Image (spheres, coloured by chain):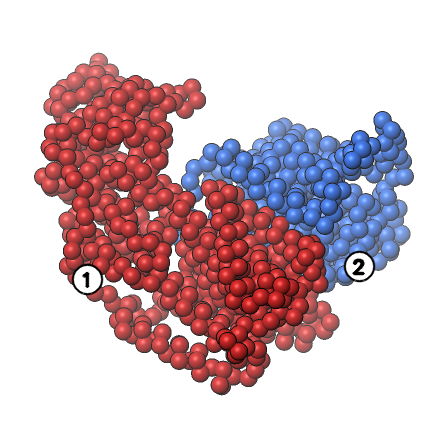
């Protein structure tokens, strides 16, 4: 391997890693607030790419139908749970959040699309359509078992991923997509060509990490999210609603996953099931950060990207084997590094 | 319901299984074969996840390792499938042992995540290795044959598959009812509990992990020679979660639940495949996995317990007979009264900058009750943890019965003869009183894996049972030995913990705040029990907060304050000591 090739591989790896980093940060965000290891974030990223591709092709994306179905389900569940608790007075509010808002988003997207909008608007539309999915899934799937063990939540999360892959095939079809590059700009740095797309990816990752840092350290909502992460009961006593904190976390997380999906779509062909590997590799990165640290997760994810890039140069067939095998030493290191009290398993 | 009824039901099930192929259509028999093959993996998971509390997403990879191993031996190299069996099981167990040694020390969800990692890595390997046919798989795998009789049709291999399932269930239930099985069932109580019983938790986890992998490898061997063709698909991550689903649906923790779960999931999948096209034409393939995952999620949300435990609640309880007298278990040589038993010399333990225990020295002599007391934050619990090996001292030495135990692991200290109880009671709530106490005898007995599974050591088992009953009677809980421990009130749970500790035949009994949370009557009963134990020449060390409880009970008291030893002496002297009053009451005005 010459230094030229190494440099190209490294830049390629950093770009891929930056995409993983966005998803990884979302994963950490959800985990710290809700204790759910949300494997399906990769699927959210892939769905965003597929949504954008459909919009580019002037088709209304399947995401719309998915959001409508999920919104109806979530509303139904919310109504049942309100009736059980005798809190029907909260019904208008529930309808607003779980039915009207998602429908409004889909409706707005549908109307806008008829006007043949420019790329920037299409990007916004894709993000708008994708962001309700994770919060709705949270309401349907995770809220009823919010107090379960991390392991239970993880098992449910893995099952949810498989459901989403099936839905992805149903709503987006088996074809892979590759969208138009967002920019044709490119520059040369130390003799190596760097595309504008790569730069965009890295910049987006940096901006979002910085934004999250500011959000958590300097806003009250951010602080309440952190409090929920530390102690659900305690924060509830302080007037923070864990459910609301969870929704905010899911919204933010899916926004980041959406951005990563948009960024990766021009670089790699994305299929309905591409999300799994994106999600898992991001997740490897998140574990490097101990599932709690945002900079740690970002650094870990970039590391995974670089490793993958070099591994695929050595043996493209075995690159995934290498990446996942590497998770085990990382887990051991993390497990040794984190001193945590013994959690008795639920009987 | 007696044991006889249970045996009758088992016999009926076996007869039903033997007769089934003569009544069922060939398609149903094939379905039954798949159920049997999946059952083996699910039974393994019931042991690993349900009993041992280790959630594994990666069992499909083990099935694959064995399937590919036997295919490589028989289809690619032309040897007998039986050699494939040996090679497949050995290879799978070897891989599992290596993975287990590396990962089983991980905690909670880290461990489960590692199973995702190696499950995926091994899964990707199958499709990417040149010699294993890549994604095309390996075809023309020979059938299993006995001499010249080959198991070609599905009704022939049926008997082999279900014979193995029946044998595995039989051995599995035997194992769970043996010394090693009880240790496995204790794993969910956490490492501290398991180690305090003189059990090496890591070893038990490893054994459980390898057993589960061995069962998966049997399944893989049968699968390869039944379908005669393998490709990476059936061993991928999706199948891993399906196996987990089977064992959870059936009832994690129940071996029979593995079979029931495999049957329910397989039949459900089959009917979903039949009926979905009627609802949504052309989209059935996609909807299948959606419907399936949705059902699993609903199940996890609403019926986590699983089918078998749910049904079992409505069946009459199995009546069990009180253990019969049996030859006693060997006892330890007890030290002569007054002899030096435990010596703590200059113990120091720091947490960062905080010195929790600072240069503490004291001695315990055989036959006495010594209390370590002190106000909140005095370092009592830290001192206790250092004694039992849950923490290591940074400086100083602890000598027990003439042997330094300063650097020993918890289970070794327990084996040396120090038995403990817990401030926050650690019992196995779903095990009976008798079984909880039998856990205490682990270090005194020696039945291993095979002896347990094949019931070869019934003498020792009978002695263990009898010993446990005697200890229950000794503490006054002998009237209902088959009651579940979780049904006892707190006071009796504390006493049950003492019975469990006594079953280890300790030379030193250490009690961590035994009076905490007890009502007055319960405290009196506990004090009576401890006095009776002293009369039997047992040495007791109590770490306690409750002055009143300690004063009337113990021979000597060591007072700790802010990590250092304040004073030491008889209860009366301690009561009148000004320094103690100051520490407890915040100074005398």
Residues B577 and B69: in front is B69
The answer to whether residue B164 is left or right of residue B127 is: left
* Protein chain holding label 2: A
Classify A188 as above or below A162: above
Q: Residue at x 55, y 54 (%)?
A: B58
- Kindly identify which residue carries mark 1: B322
Residue B325 image-quadrant placement: bottom left
- Please give left or right for residue B408 compared with residue B57 in the image: left
Q: Quadrant of the C terminus of chain B?
A: top left
- The picture places residue B20, in percent across and down from the top left corner, at 47, 82
Q: Residue at x 19, y 30 (%)?
A: B341
Q: Is residue B423 visible?
A: no
Q: Quadrant of the N terminus of chain B?
A: bottom left
Color of chain A here? blue
Residue A190 percent across, percent down from the top left: 85, 26
Chain label for disc 1:
B
Decide which of B419, A25 is in the foreground and name it. B419
- What residue would you read off at disc 2? A175
In the structure shown, which secondary structural element does the residue marked by tag 2 occupy?
A: loop
* In this view, B494 is above or below A114: above
Left or right of B521: which side holds B61?
right
Tell me where residue A136 appears, x and y as whole percent. 64, 52
Q: Which chain is red?
A: B
Q: Position of residue A40 (x, y in %)?
A: 64, 50
Q: How many angstroms separate mark 1 from mark 2 (CA)?
A: 68 Å
Confirm whether residue B126 shows in the render: yes
């Amino acid at each position: 391997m010459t230094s030229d090739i190494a440099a190209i591989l490294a830049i390629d790896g950093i770009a891929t890693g930056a995409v993983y980093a966005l998803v990884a940060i979302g994963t950490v965000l959800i985990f710290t607030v809700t204790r759910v290891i949300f494997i399906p974030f990769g699927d959210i990223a892939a769905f965003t790419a597929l949504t954008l591709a459909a919009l580019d092709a002037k088709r209304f994306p399947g995401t719309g139908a998915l959001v409508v179905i999920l919104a109806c389900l979530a509303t139904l569940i919310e109504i049942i749970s309100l009736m059980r608790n005798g809190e029907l007075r909260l019904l208008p509010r529930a309808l607003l959040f779980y039915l009207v808002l998602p429908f409004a988003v889909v409706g707005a997207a549908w109307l806008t699309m008829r006007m043949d909008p420019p790329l920037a608007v299409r990007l916004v539309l894709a993000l708008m359509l994708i962001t309700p999915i994770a919060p709705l899934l949270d309401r349907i799937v995770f809220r009823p078992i919010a107090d379960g063990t991390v392991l239970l939540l993880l098992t449910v999360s893995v099952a949810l991923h498989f459901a989403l892959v099936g839905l992805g095939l149903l709503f987006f079809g088996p074809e892979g997509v590759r969208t138009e590059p967002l920019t044709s700009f490119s520059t040369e740095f130390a003799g190596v060509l760097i595309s504008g797309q790569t730069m965009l990816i890295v910049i987006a990752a940096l901006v979002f990490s910085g934004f999250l840092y500011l959000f958590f350290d300097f806003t009250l909502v951010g602080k309440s999210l952190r409090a929920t992460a530390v102690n659900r009961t305690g924060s509830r006593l302080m007037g923070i609603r864990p459910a609301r904190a969870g929704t905010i976390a899911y919204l933010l997380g899916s926004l980041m996953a959406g951005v990563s999906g948009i960024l990766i779509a021009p670089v790699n062909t994305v299929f309905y099931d591409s999300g799994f590997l994106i999600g898992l590799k991001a997740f490897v990165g998140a574990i490097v950060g101990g599932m709690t640290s945002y900079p740690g997760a970002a650094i870990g994810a970039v590391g995974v990207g670089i490793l993958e890039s070099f591994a695929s140069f050595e043996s493209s067939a075995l690159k995934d084997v290498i990446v996942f095998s590497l998770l085990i030493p990382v887990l051991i290191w993390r497990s040794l590094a984190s001193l945590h009290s013994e959690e008795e398993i639920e009987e | 319901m007696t044991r006889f009824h249970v045996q009758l039901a088992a016999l009926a099930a076996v007869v039903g299984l033997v007769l089934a192929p003569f009544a069922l259509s060939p398609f149903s028999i094939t379905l039954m074969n798949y159920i049997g093959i999946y059952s083996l993996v699910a039974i393994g998971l019931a042991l690993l996840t349900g009993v041992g509390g280790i959630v594994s997403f990666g069992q499909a990879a083990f099935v694959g390792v064995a399937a590919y191993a036997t295919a490589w031996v028989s289809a690619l190299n032309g040897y007998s499938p039986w050699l494939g069996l040996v090679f497949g099981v050995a290879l799978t167990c070897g891989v599992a042992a290596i993975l287990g040694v590396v990962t089983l020390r991980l905690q909670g969800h880290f461990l489960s995540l590692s199973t995702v990692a190696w499950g995926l890595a091994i899964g990707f390997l199958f499709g990417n290795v040149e010699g294993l046919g890549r994604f095309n798989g390996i075809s023309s795998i020979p059938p299993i044959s006995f001499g010249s009789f080959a198991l070609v049709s599905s009704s022939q291999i049926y008997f082999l598959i279900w014979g193995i399932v029946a044998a595995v269930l039989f051995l599995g239930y035997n194992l769970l009812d043996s010394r090693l099985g009880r240790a496995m069932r204790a794993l969910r109580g956490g490492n501290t509990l398991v180690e305090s019983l003189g059990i090496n938790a890591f070893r038990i986890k490893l054994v459980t992990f390898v057993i589960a992998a061995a069962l998966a490898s049997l399944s893989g061997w049968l699968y390869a020679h039944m379908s005669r063709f393998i490709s990476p698909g059936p061993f991928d991550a999706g199948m891993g979660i399906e196996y987990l689903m089977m064992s959870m649906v059936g009832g994690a923790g129940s071996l029979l639940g593995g079979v029931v779960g495999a049957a329910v999931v397989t039949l459900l999948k089959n009917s979903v495949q039949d009926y979905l096209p009627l609802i949504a034409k052309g989209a059935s393939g996609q909807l299948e996995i959606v419907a399936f995952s949705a059902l699993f999620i609903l199940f996890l949300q609403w019926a986590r317990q699983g089918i078998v435990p749910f049904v079992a609640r409505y069946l009459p309880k199995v009546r069990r007979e009180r253990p019969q007298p049996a030859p006693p278990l060997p006892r330890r040589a007890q030290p002569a009264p007054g002899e030096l038993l435990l010596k703590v010399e200059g113990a120091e333990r720091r947490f960062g900058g905080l010195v929790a225990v600072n240069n503490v020295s004291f001695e315990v002599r055989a036959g006495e009750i010594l209390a370590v007391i002190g106000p909140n934050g005095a370092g009592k619990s830290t001192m206790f943890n250092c004694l039992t090996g849950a923490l290591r001292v940074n400086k100083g030495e602890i000598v027990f019965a003439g042997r330094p135990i300063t650097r020993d692991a918890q289970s070794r200290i327990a084996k040396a003869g120090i038995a403990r109880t817990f401030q926050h009671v650690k019992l196995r709530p779903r095990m009976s009183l008798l079984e909880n106490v039998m856990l205490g005898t682990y270090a005194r007995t020696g039945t291993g894996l095979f002896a347990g599974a094949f019931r070869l050591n019934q003498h020792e088992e009978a002695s263990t049972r009898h010993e446990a009953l005697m200890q229950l009677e000794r503490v006054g809980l002998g009237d209902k030995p088959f009651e579940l421990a979780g049904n006892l009130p707190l006071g009796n749970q504390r006493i049950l913990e003492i019975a469990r500790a006594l079953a280890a035949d300790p030379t030193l009994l250490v009690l961590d705040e035994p009076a905490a949370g007890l009502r007055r009557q319960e405290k009196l009963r506990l004090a009576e029990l401890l006095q009776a134990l002293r009369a039997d020449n047992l040495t007791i060390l109590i770490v306690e907060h409750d002055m009143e409880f300690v004063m009337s009970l113990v021979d000597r008291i060591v007072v700790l304050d802010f990590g250092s030893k304040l004073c030491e002496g008889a209860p009366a002297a301690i009561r009148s000591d000004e320094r103690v009053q100051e520490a407890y009451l915040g100074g005398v005005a």
